Image: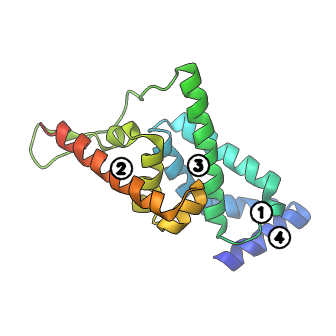
Amino acid sequence: MLKSDQRLVRKFLRAGDEAAFRELYRRHSPALYGLALRLAGGSEADAQDVLQDTWVRACRTLDNFEWRSSLRTWLTGILINRSRELARDERRRGEREMPEDYAATKCARPGQEIDLERALADLPAGYREVLLLHDVEGYTHEEIGALLGTSAGTSKSQLHHARGAMRAALSAGRR
C-alpha cells in the first residue's frame, strides 16, 4: 500500500487530482474515524470534526511528508494531536459530557452490563491513547512512542496502567 499511497499523493500534489485524493480518503478514513470516535469518548460530532481537521491539516503539509512511516501512521499522528487539542479546549470550557446513547456490552450473566466505551472514555487521555493505539490499532510501542513524542518504555508503562484501570472499571461494573 505504501507505493500506491505514494503514487496517489504525487498525483494529488502535482495536479490537484481529486480522484487521487478521494481514493486516499476512502482508503484511510474508516480506520481514522474509528480511532477518532474512541479518542472522543464516543462523540460522533467530535470524531467527525477531528477527522475533517486531520485531512485539512494533512493536505496543507503533505508536500513536507518524508515517507519515514506509512501515510496512515502520519495521519494518525495528526489525528491524535487534533484530538488532544479538542479535549484541551473542551476541558477549558468545561464542556465534556458523555453522549446519552452510549451502548453497553452485555455480559454472560443476565442483568449485568459492562459499559466498555464509558470505561475507555473515563481513562486518562494518555492511557486511552496508548491502549487504543496498541491493543486496537496494532501499533508497536516504538511506533506509539514516535506518534506521541514519548519513549517505548513510557508507552509500555501507560499500557500496563491503562489495562489495570480498565480491569478495575469493568470489575466494578459487574458488582
- Label 3 sits on what residue type? Ile
Q: Tag on residue 53?
A: none
Instruction: Please give the residue where the numbered disc 1 appears in the rendered image.
Output: 19
Does 120 sit left or right of 87 as displayed? Answer: left
Instruction: Please give the residue where the numbered disc 4 appears in the rendered image.
Output: 10
- In x, y percent, where is residue 37? 49, 44
Task: Give the residue furthest to the bottom.
Answer: 3
- Label 1 sits on what residue type? Ala
Q: Residues within 10 Å of mark 4 (few under 14, many from 20)?
A: some
- In x, y percent, where is residue 7? 77, 75
Q: If you read the primary sequence from the N terminus, does the residue marked by circle 3 or circle 2 appear first?
A: 3
User: Can residue 48 be seen here?
Assistant: no
Q: Tag on residue 162?
A: 2
Q: If you read the primary sequence from the N terminus, does the residue marked by circle 3 or circle 4 appear first?
A: 4
Instruction: Please give the residue where the numbered disc 3 appears in the rendered image.
Output: 80
Q: Residue at x 55, y 66 (%)?
A: 143
Does 144 sit left or right of 9 as displayed? Answer: left
- Tell me the quarter of the image containing the C terminus: top left
Give the Cα distance between marks 3 and 1: 26 Å
